[in-house]
Image: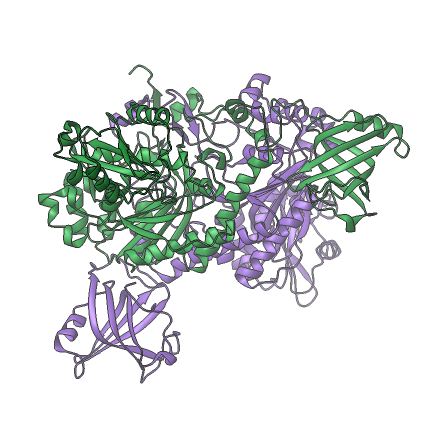
Chain colours: A purple, B green
């Protein structure tokens, strides 16, 4: 080793020891005859001292020439500091250096390597290896490491077997777009990278593996939004001989284990809510439960009083913002403008203030009597000082709009604390979802999700009403993962493919192996997958997953550090039996 | 849960309990009024019993109809068996079944699902999910799981951080062939799948991560030999501020930890051998040290006695097979034929038997006196009863041939015990290796390996003689992993690329980011990677890695179960801006 100790471990009890440290120069303070150097490594910071009277001239000159981010090895004696720094664990000591070696010089970095940096996003991504030197960034990846180790510890203790499923698999058009890999040995044929190990984990259940898990890279060739990555990581699981309740309790256990062991937070029991209730009361299948502000439907109270906008609306629905009656006219106008932005799309907003004096003042006083408004307040459970905000229109649309408004109000009122964690199971998702573009039903989860037995007859009469044995884990309004009890017999799987518009031939070509496997003794089974990047971000209190990925790609799927993707040699294309065709 | 217990846990102390089990029908024995069913799951086997006198007729009929591999759920009472089976842990009890439910029927499987099966390789691969039901196969993957968990436990305890490096990276022509992935968003450009995370882990060292590891999938588009897979798994590691010795001792520690905790074997200290010695004494850079049989060079003793074949040879070299003097003429002829096969390529073999009576009988008695042969025996350290086998020819070739012969003799004499483990560090590998095909030097390890400082001047005069700071871990003649101390400064890296025939432009285009990173304060660093599939195979006592991979590909890189690779839709090709071109 080029060091006897790290830069984070020396204390007063080490005084008088001769030590060798190695690390990066964080800072140099040169007072002429006295030079201090802060030496940094992953473990901490230690102060080196060079003094004119005791150090040789040559050594002092060497120290004076050190620049930021130089890599050095320093040997010397641990001494007690005269002026201690109680902000760092090594702040009581410093190293009186006798020998200094520059292991590598450094050019001036393109941005400051401190917790607060002057580097913009693009620059930091190009020099990601320098960005990763910053404590705040490295700590995020250390958190990720800890999350991985704790996940495995829990799963292993629960008798799950980690099995690596293949990365070079088969392309299937259902779902998102696949990344494909041309096969040189099989010209004209392609592998695909997995969007998830779904079929493999189900086959492992058919194999009797009973409990499978994997922390695994998955791939989706989607047009990237701010917080999506073409490659991402899942905690992927499957269990046999289980019912939905067993999966929920096992992964509630994982969630609690992680919170307890990584964050030291004892999580309360995870609430349950049906998809239908989530939509009705929060307008959203991933409600943020850190605050209440439930939707209240006002059709009965607000219609038929001559206010045309409400009379014509399918749904009149609102929320009650506790203590917000003091919002000024200006603030309320701004709020109205906010909901009318095209991203939200409301036509307008009605509000009613429950004033401190007991009166209720609304924007629609012309149509509603004081008693009418009092009845609204009762419906909302509003008290003096509260603000009622009401939207109206087509039910599905207005719920989405109000959901956005609810989240904004929660944000504005400081109700979305990053250190509070409110997990929720959303259950009973619909099996199918109508797709306007293709004009057919798609699987809301995926084609292997089982419908609720009692809803199967609806498949022919009202497919959109069929509920699935499917569930999502939501924390603080973020979808952390989802899963389902799977179909495990050929007949139901075929029925499902039929309803998804697969011909028998298509179903057989793409998933014949799975349906055949179901005929050789497939046990009832189900599973779940957690988005690991997002889970880490939630634990770290961040909105962006990118910070929790060591080498992320930008929104064009490009790694700007290594400059990839890139063109490849003609020889490679030829060997792969493909041509580039830029003309379409 | 569809069960209260697994099929592996019930014992005498559970007698009289009402239990529910679920699993697969392993066997049905029907004695008319009495039916026994062996129920199997991952955890074991439990006997179910159905009796005419106590069971209802309907239940008995149901049991009679069960076939192999049916999935059933059975509820009943644990009773003590009259005739116990001490071969299985549950052999003292059976379940008197009161309720039986068939959860899924099963077609007759295409091969027998027992430890010994009648299924051929291809059939078992096509129905891999059934093959995986066999205990002997599942146990291999459970071993793999345990190896993974223990590896992580050790690395975590040693302060290594597990960092996931990207799978979609950049193609570089150096080394083996890349798998590539067309980028839809960047038409005409391609990602490559990593052959190893080499450059990323080095960048993590530049980032100050200090100790990195990952258990990671890697990819190589090679023409597959029997024991290669296009995707394989590595334990990948890197450390900063270290010298070779630190890496050897850390990973010797990992190896010992795994042997102790997975196999219960306390490993002795790992021996060291230079590459030069390995070649000189074993003709092989991965010698099997479970047996000695070192090469003995005989040029001094065997030349100049009128035996033309030896006189003309660059090298006369042999091995001494202890106790093999009793080999018959027929056996020795067969051995001579064996070394003359084209796969080995020797022109012939000389042998000398040290008989029990003290005489030495050789095939070249015409040229060598009894004293000459006695001198040979002394050189070999041969004793009465030993057999000396001698080959001659061009030094490099004859060493390879003798290495094969040595391994065969070790095998034939029963010296290669699968339960004995002899690990070895081979060190001081050459930096460069001459490639006949391209007529230039290639990096023996990879272009990032550092030359030994004292050998750098040889780069210009005798490149093949330059030794690298590179090492391999070998166990029982199998290369488990290798690594090196890396170059960490731009000048040396450029020098290396120059000697590998890169133009400055090529070097910059492919590895500019790495060389630039070296200018911003790169610490001295080095690392290693273990082939995880192979390590598992060694632990399992198997020669083939394929058994230790859940869903392996065949020798054409095809997954015969899911039938991949496959053609993809024209629409996909169009979106990716590529065409299939089968005409070249």
Is residue A567 visible in this depiction of the protein? no
Q: Is residue A349 above or below residue B371?
A: below
Q: Is residue B25 above or below residue A275?
A: above
- Give the quarter of the figure containing the N terminus of chain B: top right
Find residue A495 and report its horizontal and vertical position in percent.
66, 23
Q: Looking at the image, which residue is at 44% across and 32% down?
A: A168
Q: Is residue A383 above or below residue B282?
A: below
Q: Residue furthest left?
A: B461
Left or right of A47? Residue A360 is right
Residue B253 lies in what quarter of the image? bottom left
Q: Residue furthest right?
A: B53
Q: Nearer the viewer, residue B307 or A466?
A: B307
Left or right of B67? Residue A574 is left
Find residue B426 and report its horizontal and vertical position in percent.
30, 48
Left or right of A7? Residue A504 is right
Q: Looking at the image, which residue is at 17% across and 54% down?
A: B453
Find residue B406 and report its horizontal and vertical position in percent.
33, 36
Q: Nearer the viewer, residue B311 or A160?
A: B311
- Give the quarter of the figure containing the C terminus of chain B: top left
Residue B63 lies in what quarter of the image? top right
* Count of numbered labels shown in the rendering: 0
Q: Nearer the viewer, residue A177 or B145?
A: B145
Q: Nearer the viewer, residue A381 or A280?
A: A280
Find residue B74 and report its horizontal and vertical position in percent.
78, 37
């Amino acid at each position: 080793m080029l060091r006897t100790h790290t830069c984070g471990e020396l204390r007063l009890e080490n005084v008088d020891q001769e030590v060798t440290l190695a690390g990066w120069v964080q800072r140099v303070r040169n007072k002429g005859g006295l030079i201090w150097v802060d030496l940094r490594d992953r473990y901490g910071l230690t102060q080196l001292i060079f003094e004119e009277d005791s150090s040789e001239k040559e050594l002092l000159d060497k120290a004076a020439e050190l620049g930021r981010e130089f890599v050095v090895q320093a040997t010397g004696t641990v001494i007690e500091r005269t002026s201690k720094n109680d902000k760092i664990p090594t702040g009581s000591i410093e190293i009186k250096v006798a020998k200094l070696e520059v292991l590598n010089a450094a050019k001036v970095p393109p941005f400051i390597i401190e917790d607060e940096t002057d580097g913009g996003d693009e620059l930091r991504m190009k020099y990601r290896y320098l960005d990763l030197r910053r404590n705040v960034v490295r700590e995020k990846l250390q958190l990720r490491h800890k999350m991985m180790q704790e996940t495995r510890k829990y799963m292993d203790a629960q008798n799950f077997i980690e099995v690596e499923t293949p990365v070079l698999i088969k392309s299937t058009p259902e779902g998102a777009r696949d990344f494909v890999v041309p096969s040189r040995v099989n010209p004209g044929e392609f592998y695909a990278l997995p969007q998830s190990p779904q079929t493999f984990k189900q086959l492992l259940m058919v194999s009797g593996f009973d409990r499978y898990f994997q922390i695994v890279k998955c791939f989706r060739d989607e047009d990237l939004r701010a917080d999506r990555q073409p490659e991402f990581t899942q905690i992927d699981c499957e269990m046999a001989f289980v019912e939905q309740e067993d999966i929920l309790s096992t992964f509630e256990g994982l969630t609690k284990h992680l919170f307890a062991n990584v964050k030291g937070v004892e999580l309360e029991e995870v609430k349950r809510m049906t998809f239908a209730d989530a939509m009705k009361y929060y307008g959203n299948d991933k409600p943020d439960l850190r605050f209440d502000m439930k939707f209240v439907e006002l059709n009965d109270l607000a219609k038929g009083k001559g206010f045309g906008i409400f009379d014509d609306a399918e749904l009149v629905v609102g929320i009650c913002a506790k203590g917000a009656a003091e919002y000024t006219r200006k603030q309320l106008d701004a709020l109205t403008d906010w909901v009318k932005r095209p991203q939200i799309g409301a036509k307008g907003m009605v509000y009613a203030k429950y004033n401190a004096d007991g009166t209720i003042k609304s924007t629609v006083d012309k149509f509603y009597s004081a008693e009418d408004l009092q009845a609204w307040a009762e419906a909302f459970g509003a008290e003096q000082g509260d603000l009622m905000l009401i939207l109206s229109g087509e039910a599905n649309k207005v719920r989405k709009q109000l959901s956005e408004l609810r989240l904004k109000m929660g944000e504005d009122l400081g109700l979305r604390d990053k250190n509070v964690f409110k997990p929720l199971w959303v259950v009973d998702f619909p099996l199918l979802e109508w797709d306007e573009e293709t004009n057919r039903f798609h699987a809301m989860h995926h084609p292997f999700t089982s419908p609720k037995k009692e809803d199967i007859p609806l498949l022919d009469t009202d497919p959109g009403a069929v509920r699935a044995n499917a569930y999502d884990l939501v924390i603080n309004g973020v979808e952390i993962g989802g899963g389902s009890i799977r179909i495990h017999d050929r007949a139901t799987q075929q029925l499902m493919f039929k309803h998804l518009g697969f011909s028998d031939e298509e179903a057989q070509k793409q998933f014949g192996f799975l349906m055949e496997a179901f005929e050789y003794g497939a046990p009832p089974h189900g599973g779940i997958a957690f988005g690991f990047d997002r889970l880490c971000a939630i634990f770290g209190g961040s909105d962006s997953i990118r910070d929790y990925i060591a080498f992320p790609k930008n929104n064009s799927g490009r790694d700007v550090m290594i400059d990839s993707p890139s063109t490849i040699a003609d020889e490679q294309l030829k060997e792969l039996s493909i041509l580039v065709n830029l003309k379409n």
